Every structure is written in C-alpha cells, then in structure tokens.
Image (spheres, rainbow, N blue to C red):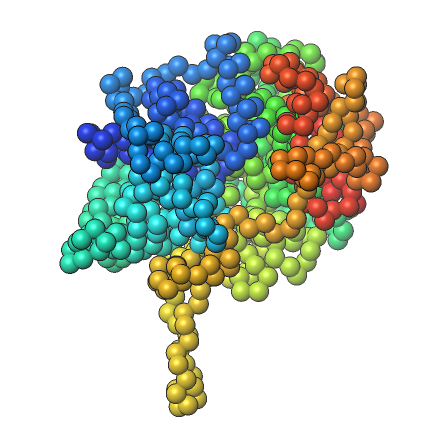
Amino acid sequence: MASTGCGKTLANGRIMYALANPQQGARFSIALGLRTLTLQTGQALRDRLHLGEDELTVRVGGSANKALFEHYEQEAEASGSASKQVLIEEDAHVVFDGNFDSHPVLRRLSDEPGTRALIAAPILVCTVDHLMPATESTRGGRQIVPMLRLMSSDLVLDEIDDFDINDLPALTRLVNWAGLLGSRVLLSSATLPPALVEGLYEAYRSGREAFQRHRGEPGLAVDICCAWFDEHDRQHESCASSETFKAAHQDFAKRRLERLAKSPVRRRADILALPPLGKRPEEIRPATATLLRENALALHQQHHSVDPHSGKRVSFGLVRMANIDPLVDVARVLFQQGAPEGVRIHLCVYHSRHPLVMRSGIERQLDRTLQRAEPDRVFQQPDIRRLLDSSEESDHLFIVLGSPVTEVGRDHDYDWAIVEPSSMRSIIQLAGRVRRHREQVCESPNILLLDTNLKHWEQPGKPAFHKPGFETDLQWRLSSHSLSELLTEDEYKVIDARPRVLARETLHAKDSLVDLEHERLHQLMIEQPAEPLTKKELRIGKTPKPPPLGAYSWHVMPQLHLTGVLIQRDPFRQQLEPEITLALLPDEGGETWTLHRVDDGAKRGEKLYVPVEESLLVRVELAKEQGERIQPWGATDYLTALADLAEGLDISLERAARTFGTVTASARNQRWGYHPVLGFWRSR
C-alpha cells in the first residue's frame, strides 16, 4: 500500500521475485481490471526487467486494444521517445525451463489458442477476466486453464479497490481458490480499506486450511505469513487468526497514517458551494458549464506555469464529471461560451464512448503532454508549441473534461482539478493526478469539489452518489447530498489516502460519505451474525435464520461450493443493460463515414454491418456553435486518425474501421448524437 506514483507496479514484481524458490524461478500472475492498464503494466515490466516473449505474456480481452498499444509502442521506440531506464539489477532474471510438449497433461491443451502462453509463461500480466473462470464457470471446461494457472503460480491483484463493489464477491472467490490451490496472494493499491483486506484474508485463510488438510497436514495449525509494504517501511507477522491479522494490519495502517500526515502537502482542496442551478437538465447543465468555466479561470490564475519561450501563462486542468451525457452537454455549452479577452481555452473531451481509434489518440496525446517530472519539458512538445505560438492570447488553459476514466491507471500530472463527487474513493484517486510528478508544496487550493452531484439537482429525492458511487435507493441512503455536511474538514482540506486506509470505530453510514464506503464494505466482506429469533419464534421452536448472504458466504458456507447459486447471484462484471456495438465505416473514397450496427452472423465469428445512420444517429456541427478563443484539443478528426492508423499498420481503411472504429453503447437508447470531438451521447 504505497502512494500514487511511487512505483507499486515494479515493486509488486520485485516482491514476488524475492519470495520465489531460487531453484524453480518466479511464477506469478498480475491481474488488473482495465485493459489499458494491463497493457501498460506488461510493457513496463518487459522493458524494466528485460523479459522476452517466452518469459512474460500479456493477455487482454480485446485484440484491437492490444494491436493499437503495440503499434504506438513501436512508433515511440522508432522515434527514441520510449523509456530505456534500468530499474532492476541485470542478473535479477526470471528463468523458466519447463517443457510444455513433454508434459503428460499440458500437451493435451497445446492445441487450444492462447492456452500455452497462459499456462507456460513465468510471468502473466492479464485482465482479471482471464483468471475468473477458475471459480465462475457454471458449465464445465472453461475453468481448467485458469485453474492450472492459479495452481502453478502466485497471484498479484493490482489496484484491487478500484473494482466495482458488485465485483468483490467474485474476487473473494478467486482469492479463496488461490489459497485452496496453494498460491501466495499480493494485494496492491494506494487506498486499501481495512474491511476489504480483512475479508480477503479470511477468504484466503479458509482456502489455505483446505490446502494443508489435503496435503497431508491436517493437524498443523494454519499460520499464514503476512507482510505489509509501503514506500517507507515493511513489516511481517505470522497470522493464525483473524484477530492477529486485524491487529497487525491496524498497526501498519496507523503508522502509515502518521507518515502521510507529515508528508509535504501537494494538494489542497475546498468545497465549491453551488447556487440553485435550476430544475430541468436544460437549465442545470448550462448553469454548471458557466460555473466550471468561471472557477477554471480562477484556478488558472493561481496554478499555472510560465512558458520560457513566449512568457505566456499556461495551465493544465482536469474537470471530472460523474456521467457522460451531462459531460457532453457541458462541453457543448463551454464551446459556445468561448473564452474572455486575452485567454484561450483548449478543450479535450475524454470518456469511454469514443471510437477506439479516437480514444487511443486522446490517451496518447495526454500521456505525452502530462508527464511533468521535468516541468518545462511540456513546452517543447511540438503540438503544445504549435498551439501556443499560433495565437496572441497571454493565458492558455488546457482543460480535460473527463468521465471517471480519468481516475485510474493514467500517469498524468495536472496543475488543478474540479471534481463532481461520486465517492471518497474516486476523490482520492483523482487527487492523485494533481501535481503527481512534482513535489513542491502547495499553499492555496488546487482542487475544487462541487458541493453535490448533478443528479441531486436533476433527480431530487433519488440517490445522487450512485452509478458510480456507494449510495443505493433503499438500504444505503445518505441523509444529505451536500459534501459540506458529509465530509469533515480533515477529510477534504488535504486530500490523501487517510480516510480510506483506516475506519472510525463507530461508523455513521447515513451521515458520512467516508463511513458509507467503510460500512458497505464491512457488511459485504466480513461475516455478519444471523438475525436473532423473536420470542414468539423461539416459543414455537423455529429454526434459526441463516446469516445474510455476502462475499464471505462462499467460504463460510462450504456447501455453496457445490452449487452455482452465488456465482449466478453475484456474477463478475454483471451487465446491467443490453449493449450493441456501433461502427463508423468509411465510403469507398474515404471522404465520409456512415454509422453501422454490428450484429453476429449465422456462422461462428461472422459479423454483419447493418446501416443505422438514418434511424440512430444525430450529427452535430460543432464548428457552427463554437465561440471565440476556444478550440478542441486532442484527436479531432475521425477519418484522418483512421487513415494514419491504416497506413501505419499497412491495412485497408475499411479493415481499420471495422477493428478500431467501433464503440459499445446501450441497446435501449433510441438516438445517439456524435461528433469526433465530443464522442457519442444520448440524444434527447
């Protein structure tokens, strides 16, 4: 559990390498939640540990993502911009001499595509979906390969607290089976809540008990060696019981909190009180855009850099919004409003509903620009240089207006941020992108938290910190939606991991955003007592009620292993609504494109492209509604981006569009608006 930007990815590899048997070599799997983060992690380990294709395998559930990533990595190496820094000793190497073909069992699997690499590679970096079938299969077959992988290697769960709370039962089952199959487990994140860690320890301990029993050690007490690491220190303890583990974890968390409290303050925050914004979305979203612009200009005045070439004041800011549709409406109003005299705004709209090639272009642009370890290097970037030199304004704001995809796994360093809140977890993660690479002390607030969420205004009386967030309609309702009432000053004035790392002794889930998260995790992860019988029920001799179902039920009630009940009740990555794939296919001359829906054909693997331009799409001409002194920043033209990619990969424009010009959207929505700068949004 180390702070953001401290190198946890590499530390995870070094810890697992150090724990491995020197004669056998290291074998471990790093499982992550996001495809882009998985690809970045695999590339970082391959470069810095000098690992070949036969030693490290990267597996993500989307060949298009991987192809794009590898193409741009090759471009970076050709231009000399890829990192060559050596971060581990030359002789610290991972060795694997296993012969796949001569093994009596493994050779039977060698014809399955991808199986050999998944099982044989000493180091596997994958999305967690590749390992989940070990415990999640309700039909036979799919669980064999991930089970063999779990049985033969250790498991690293990276950024585990960034999974949705509904995915934690499935992750608990995975950790339980890692213990059952004799693997070590490493949990890694900047903000690990105590209930999550304790619940996963219990799941692992239960599995380990069965492992020892079946290895001929039934009388030997389960005494698990547990270790804690951060950027300052490490500790270890033999934990035979939950009480021992809980005490050791609290001891580590308290010491970590003391160190965090003494760290130089790089991020200060304030709550931005909101005036009445209106009653309907058509009033609320334009009013929000005006408010955001006004406060972005104020933050720019206090937190900017000076371009050494031109003397212009430049800042890079992030405006995080909870949901895509309000975000696009706010972006359109910002484009209409423009910027005041003497100021130029460069606006990048970044969310998950862009076609793959456009989203990849935006991410590459941000990755290049927002590496700020050398603060003045940004002014040497050709595209930033061009934008600064091509206009007369003395103040330049580069603003990323983004959805929650801006929070996790992006190594970006912004000067300031404005946040529409969803949860304390997301606030802490987002704060980790502000002054991420620069250690100078901050004196005035560089993060503004909107006092409430737009849902509070648009859907009064309903949960606001919800999808994303921990609030629910019935059991987990907050008494207020105002951050000034839900957070204490020590929880938001200086934003770091402290509110997540240790919970208060008495939790008030209805009155505190922080306590709501701890209480929900505690109820889900830690075994709850059964409801006591009433006096009347006792008199008539009723049998005691079973405890409520939670993530812990899998290992507390072993008979559930024999059924698919929990797997069906709490599946991993449950799809809440049906989805369709849309593709933007070019015409024969490559001059324009039309929207198609992608359907499955009659044959296996066959795809049908059905034109839906007339029935589904509303095109927007952004240039006609664009105000003065504001311009798009990032990937701005779909066909140009697609043609460049097709040329780089040496494939046809049509094939590039079918692979990289797609986006996943809700099947229930009747009309979609689209513009290359804005992405897709629900059109009213």
Q: Where does the image place residue 480, in percent across and percent down from the top left? A: 57, 59
Foreground pick, 264 / 453: 453
Residue 622 location, quadrant: top right
Q: Is residue 214 above or below residue 353?
A: below
Foreground pick, 305 / 475: 475
What residue is at 62 percent from the left and 14 percent from the top?
650
Can you say which quadrant of the picture contains the C terminus? top right
What residue is at 58 percent from the left and 21 percent from the top?
365
What residue is at 41 percent from the left and 72 percent from the top?
546
Relative side of 575 to 40, left or right: right
What residue is at 21 percent from the left and 46 percent from the top?
225
Q: Where does the image place residue 598, in percent across and percent down from the top left? A: 70, 36
Can you say which quadrant of the picture contains the N terminus? top left
Q: Is residue 511 above or below residue 93?
A: below
Foreground pick, 482 / 538: 538
Give the mark count: 0
Q: Where does the image place residue 44, in percent across and percent down from the top left? A: 41, 24
Q: Is residue 631 above or below residue 228?
A: above
- Please indicate, yes or no, whether residue 295 appears anywhere in the rendered image: no
Residue 65 location, quadrant: top right
Q: Residue furthest bottom?
A: 539
- Please indicate, yes or no, whether residue 86 appears anywhere in the rendered image: yes
Q: Where does the image place residue 75, in percent across and percent down from the top left? A: 53, 14
Q: Is residue 550 above or below residue 334?
A: below
